[in-house]
Image (cartoon, rainbow, N blue to C red):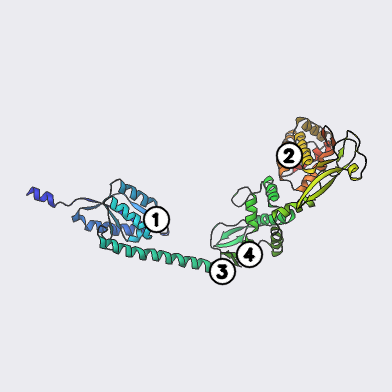
């Protein structure tokens, strides 16, 4: 008799209840959708108590996760516990709580079968161990996937219609704007910076040069990061600044206020139509030669900027006036023609080296004390040390001005080159640096 009673005791089945909700809306309520799903599942498990079913204490709740992916924390934990042999039955309110993707669900069923785990939906009758149950399950999953795809198409259509009406549909907020009541509103401080970037690009014609200048000025974008060339190109190509909304390459009148005038936009994009190579050549030809009027041979003959063209390339030189006017060049004098890039690079390197020496700092301190008003010696030293960083960010025209301010004369001889600096020029530069935002 006791043996008969033992055989009639059903095997205990450990039941894991899984719940999911796509959005986070309402999850902070005292009794939310996840609680409702769990309550229904617990009631179903209780109804199967005679079969040995018992719900385990662990909760597997995914609130705010889509059914279109398996990348869900509670689901991952559930699968890990299945592989560990801790679960016999999975109970859900509906099959789409586990997945809305037919392919993903097939992977889940494979994992269930591999570990002898049964899957149960309390609102739909399924037994995944039979062929008929699998067929029915696949049919319903196909409809679940179809429903998800229809919802996605509906959302995309609504998004497109809203963009065509010029509405802001979320995403990264562009520099120059803030979002209030789901609409873009102008941030005046950032808008001024955006206009400045457009205007300076027109003046320079080079995103690289502008980026170096903005980095030297410690300019930052909306995220607080340093502005680079890539950010500048994205900014000057963003039609949101014209008051437009763009969807799949097509522009529509936006609900927000424009920051950039159409004329300024056209000026910028007129420059962008020119190839970067042509722009570099144009910028070089427009900029005044760095050493014009201050470079001489060791015999006192002035050297003047010249250039020659080979094909599409332009080669710049400094040429002795003796050579230009076919005069006799004295024996043993310096070279009659020098590569502009070579000599300018050498002068700049020597100028930057000299400025950073302690002797120059001492001379500038003495000059400041004599001419006044006196400056703190620490400020003078800091300004001189900062010069190298500043030089890299200067526009070509600003570099010319600095060289004319600092360099009195460049003398080229057969043995090398001498650079004479202006003491008062260095003192003036230091004062400009100290008064600027660079320190």
Disc with the residue nearer the chain's start (3 vs 2): 3
Front label number (1 vs 3): 3
Q: Give whichever of discs 2 and 1 has the lower sequence position.
A: 1
217 vs 379, nearest the viewer: 217
* 262 to the left or right of 78: right
Mark 2 to mark 4: distance in Å?
Answer: 41 Å
Q: Is residue 290 above or below residue 250?
A: above
The percent coordinates of residue 98 (x first, y second) are 35, 57
Residue 272: percent from the left, percent from the top?
69, 58
Q: Quadrant of residue 364?
A: top right
Nearer the N terminus, badge 1 or badge 4?
1
> Mark 4 falls on what kind of element?
loop
Residue depth check, mark 3 versus mark 4: number of the one nearer the observer: 3
Q: Quadrant of residue 84?
A: top left
Q: CA distance from mark 1 to mark 4?
A: 38 Å
Residue located beneath label 3 in the image: 164
Task: From the image, tell me which residue sits under label 2.
Answer: 387
Q: Quadrant of the C terminus?
A: top right
Spatial CA span between label 1 and label 3:
33 Å
Q: Is residue 31 visible?
A: no
Image coords of residue 227 (percent x, y): 64, 49
The residue that disc 4 covers is 243
Residue named by callout 1? 63
């Amino acid at each position: 008799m006791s043996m008969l009673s033992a055989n009639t005791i059903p095997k205990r089945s450990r039941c894991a209840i899984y719940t999911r909700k796509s959005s986070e809306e309402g999850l902070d309520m005292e009794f939310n959708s996840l609680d409702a799903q769990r309550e229904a599942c617990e009631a179903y498990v209780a109804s199967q108590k005679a079969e040995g079913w018992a719900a385990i204490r662990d909760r597997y709740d995914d609130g705010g996760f889509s059914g279109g992916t398996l990348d869900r924390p509670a689901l991952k934990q559930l699968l890990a516990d299945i592989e560990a042999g801790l679960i016999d039955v999975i109970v859900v309110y509906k099959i789409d709580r586990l997945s809305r993707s037919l392919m993903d669900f097939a992977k889940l069923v494979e994992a269930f079968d591999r570990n002898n785990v049964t899957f149960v939906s309390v609102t739909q009758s399924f037994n995944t161990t039979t062929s008929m149950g699998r067929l029915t399950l696949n049919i319903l999953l196909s409809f679940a996937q179809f429903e998800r795809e229809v919802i996605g198409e509906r959302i995309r259509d609504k998004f497109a219609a809203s963009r065509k009406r010029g509405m802001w549909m979320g995403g990264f907020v562009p520099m120059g704007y803030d979002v209030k009541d789901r609409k873009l509103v102008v941030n005046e401080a950032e808008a001024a910076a955006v206009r400045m970037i457009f205007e300076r690009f027109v003046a320079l014609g080079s995103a690289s040069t502008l980026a170096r200048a903005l980095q030297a000025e410690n300019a930052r974008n909306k995220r607080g990061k340093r502005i680079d060339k890539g950010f500048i190109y994205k900014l000057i190509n963003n039609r949101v600044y014209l008051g437009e909304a763009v969807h799949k390459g097509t522009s529509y009148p936006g609900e927000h206020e424009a920051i950039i005038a159409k004329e300024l936009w056209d000026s910028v994009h007129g420059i962008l139509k020119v190839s970067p190579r042509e722009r570099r050549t144009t910028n070089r030809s427009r900029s005044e030669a760095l050493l014009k009027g201050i470079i001489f041979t060791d015999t006192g003959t002035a050297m003047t900027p010249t250039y020659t063209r080979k094909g599409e390339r332009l080669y710049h030189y400094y040429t002795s006036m003796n050579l230009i006017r076919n005069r006799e060049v004295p024996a043993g004098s310096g070279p009659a023609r020098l590569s502009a890039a070579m000599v300018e690079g050498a002068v700049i390197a020597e100028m930057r080296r000299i400025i950073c020496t302690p002797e120059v700092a001492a001379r500038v301190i003495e000059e400041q004390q004599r001419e006044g008003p006196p400056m703190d010696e620490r400020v003078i030293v800091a300004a001189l040390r900062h010069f190298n960083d500043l030089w890299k960010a200067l526009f070509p025209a600003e570099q010319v001005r600095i060289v004319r301010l600092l360099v009195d004369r460049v003398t080229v001889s057969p043995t090398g080159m001498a650079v004479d600096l202006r003491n008062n020029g260095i003192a003036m530069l230091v004062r400009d640096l100290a008064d600027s935002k660079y320190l």
